[in-house]
Image (spheres, rainbow, N blue to C red):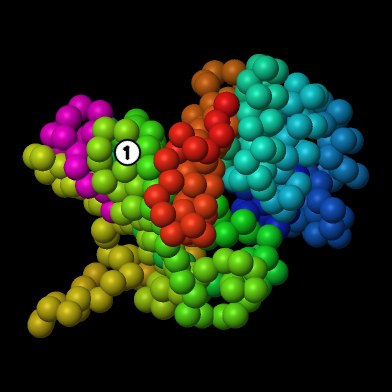
């Protein structure tokens, strides 16, 4: 197979290395607005071609396209790929706004072109174990879920200014994975947030720490927390509490939490420093899955519709944070 990739930044270069290592990928063609960076990566990997631009790449006979460019480029690049009839993997978010996301969802669904969105937690072994347990009733009825995404340190100010806010950028992963493991939709949200860190969060209309109380359609209570300042380490967890049992994701030696109990120092480590450390295997697995999607041997494991639903929850949380009252998902436009 011949796979194209747009964007060779941190996640794009990682994806390029993953694709180059897959037996099913015979040729990799990359492009980036920074052509020097694209050529440097191609030279490092060896046997990788560099296209002048995305249009050239799309018309070079690629069997699939991976979009890992900057967020503002996602929507136009995805539209180009769909118009060209090329199966596409796109990093989240699909678009920066809800109207754009709705438009793309309609475009993709009417086209029939396979599109997979990059919510990598769906490929993490722990989350998949929880999903299977819920599906077979191992935990009985589920009444409470706790989900958190805690970054060790904040990204640059320039990133925050265009990120869309902590719920759209960070907690959206939790919103997607809650839908994935439970098979349920969110009915209402009540969100809040604050900033005790750098002033650039406030300047961007964002917060460095946020929390949301979600109620699922079956009454399950979901507690979501996010922060850009978790000095103990990168900490992404999910705890699912049920009538007959409980399961946790991320509760291993890497857990970035010390114990206050005498004689118990807590997990030995090493702790994760970033999402790339934490989800390396999941990132690799999702691209291997995309290759199967591109050659038509499996359906998309994370559709634009899935991305839309997670985005709607994030949108509701931002509205709730600003208005200081609960928001029903029925108030957020859907397809």
For residue 50, side relative to residue 270 (left or right): right
- Residue at x 17% of width, y 30% of height: 137
| Disc 1 target residue | 216
Picture layout, residue 281 above or below residue 141: below
Horizontal and vertical percent for residue 69? Answer: 72, 50
- Residue at x 26% of width, y 58% of height: 251
Q: Name the foreground residue: 117 vs 222.
A: 222
**Quadrant (top left, top right, bottom left, bottom right) of the C terminus:** top right
The image quadrant that residue 141 belongs to is: top left
Picture layout, residue 7 above or below residue 163: above
Decide if residue 117 is in sight here: yes
The image quadrant that residue 235 belongs to is: bottom left
Horizontal and vertical percent for residue 313? Answer: 47, 44
How many numbered dots are placed on residues in this image? 1
Q: Where are the magenta residues, as a range?
A: 133-146
- Residue at x 54% of width, y 18% of height: 297
Dot 1 alpha-carbon crowd within 10 angstroms: few under 14, some 14 to 19, many 20 or more: some
- Residue at x 54% of width, y 72% of height: 154
């Amino acid at each position: 197979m011949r796979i194209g990739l747009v964007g060779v930044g941190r996640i794009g270069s990682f994806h390029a290395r993953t694709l180059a290592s897959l037996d099913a990928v015979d040729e990799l063609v990359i492009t980036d607005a920074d052509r020097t960076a694209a050529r440097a990566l191609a030279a490092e990997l060896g046997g990788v071609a560099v296209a002048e631009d995305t249009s050239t790449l799309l018309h070079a006979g690629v069997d699939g396209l991976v979009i890992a460019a900057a967020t503002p480029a996602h929507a136009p690049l995805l539209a180009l790929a769909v118009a060209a009839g090329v199966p596409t993997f796109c990093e989240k978010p699909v678009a920066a706004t809800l109207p754009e996301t709705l438009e793309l969802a309609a475009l993709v669904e009417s086209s029939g072109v396979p599109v997979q969105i990059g919510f990598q937690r769906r490929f993490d072994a722990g989350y998949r174990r929880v999903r299977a347990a819920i599906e077979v009733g191992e935990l009985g009825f589920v009444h409470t879920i706790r989900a958190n995404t805690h970054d060790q340190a904040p990204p640059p100010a320039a990133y925050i200014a265009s990120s869309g806010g902590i719920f759209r950028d960070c907690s959206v992963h939790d919103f997607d994975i809650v839908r994935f493991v439970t098979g349920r939709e969110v009915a209402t949200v009540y969100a809040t947030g604050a900033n005790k860190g750098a002033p650039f969060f406030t300047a961007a209309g964002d917060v460095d720490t946020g929390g949301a109380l979600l109620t699922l359609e079956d009454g399950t209570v979901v507690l979501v927390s996010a922060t850009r300042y978790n000095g103990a380490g990168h900490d992404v967890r999910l705890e699912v509490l049920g009538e007959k049992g409980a399961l946790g994701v991320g509760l291993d030696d890497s857990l970035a939490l010390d114990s206050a109990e005498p004689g118990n120092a807590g997990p030995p480590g090493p702790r994760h420093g970033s999402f790339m450390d934490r989800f390396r295997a999941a990132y690799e697995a999702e691209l291997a899955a995309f290759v199967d999607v591109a050659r038509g041997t499996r359906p998309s494991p994370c559709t634009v519709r899935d991305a839309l639903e997670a985005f709607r929850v994030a949108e509701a949380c931002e509205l709730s944070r600003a208005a200081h009252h609960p928001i029903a998902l029925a108030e957020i436009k859907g397809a």
